[in-house]
Amino acid sequence: MGRQALAARPFTRRTVAGLTRLALPAAGGAPHLWFASAADAPCDEALLDERERARAARIAGPGRRREYVVAHTALRLLLGAYLRCPPAAVRLVRHGCPCCGEPHGRPAVPGDPVHFSLSHSAGAALLAFAAAPVGTDLQAVPGLRTADRVADLLTGRERRELTARDPRTRPAAFARVWARKEAYLKGLGTGLGRDPSRDHLGAGRVPVAPAGWWVRDVRTGSGHAAAVAVRTSSDTPAGVTTQDRTTQDMCTHGEGR
């Protein structure tokens, strides 16, 4: 797997029309990446299970609700194609969280025939499928004040890399490093239950991959930054324990992210 940013395949209504069976991602190969825009991707709440529909009903605002339903519609249609089963019949479960042991770790299907991750933000969704644990994250580029404030959660080196940038390009650079960070933490299964300042992913042109992981940026077009992380070793990173949990509120992993 190379070092350059990856491209995601578009997932649209036209894609679904020709979608039948998909080969599972190959062991040691690059993840399969799909990008869905809420404007032109399928949005079929009937495919979702009871828990997903309840989650959608709690989301305030029709735009954000549609974004969630589009992301989960795409997830079920793609999993159905990979697993050769009806999309509505796909059973979604959760692995245990490495921080606290509760069942809100990485989303999964029973038996892990394929690993997957999804993220949605600002009217779009990114989905990743791999033969090993995988995490992906999609971030809308924030304003400068937000980027500078949240940068306090990064490593010291990442903060210095961002501070050295022109303020006009700093928000996009922040979104890039934060997407790398969340993709890795979601791949671990901890989410933000693990302190983001513990792991250096870098704010430079190329991600810095933690030991045992492969991390790449994903090209998604203007307005977003995205990344994907795939585990290449079964070794658990140092310090992934219940001590990573700062608060019970942080040790939760929102479905659909």
Image (spheres, rainbow, N blue to C red):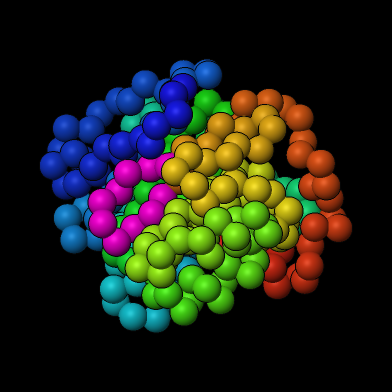
Residue pictured at 33% horizontal, 25% vertical:
22
Instruction: Provide the major secondary structure of the magenta segment.
Output: strand
Residue nearest the viewer, comparing 38 with 72: 38
Residue pictured at 26% horizontal, 57% vertical:
222
Q: Is residue 56 above or below residue 74?
A: below
Residue nearest the viewer, comparing 188 with 146: 146
Q: Is residue 228 above or below residue 81?
A: below
Give the image quarter of residue 7: top left
Q: Is residue 42 above or below residue 17?
A: below
Locate residue 21, reporting x and y percent: 30, 25
* Image: magenta residue range: 217-226
Locate residue 17, reporting x and y percent: 15, 38
Give the image quarter of residue 184: top right
Asked whether residue 27 appears in the rendered view, the answer is: yes
Locate residue 101, reporting x and y percent: 79, 52
Magenta segment includes 197: no
Residue pictured at 13% horizontal, 42% vertical:
14
Residue nearest the viewer, comparing 128 with 103: 128
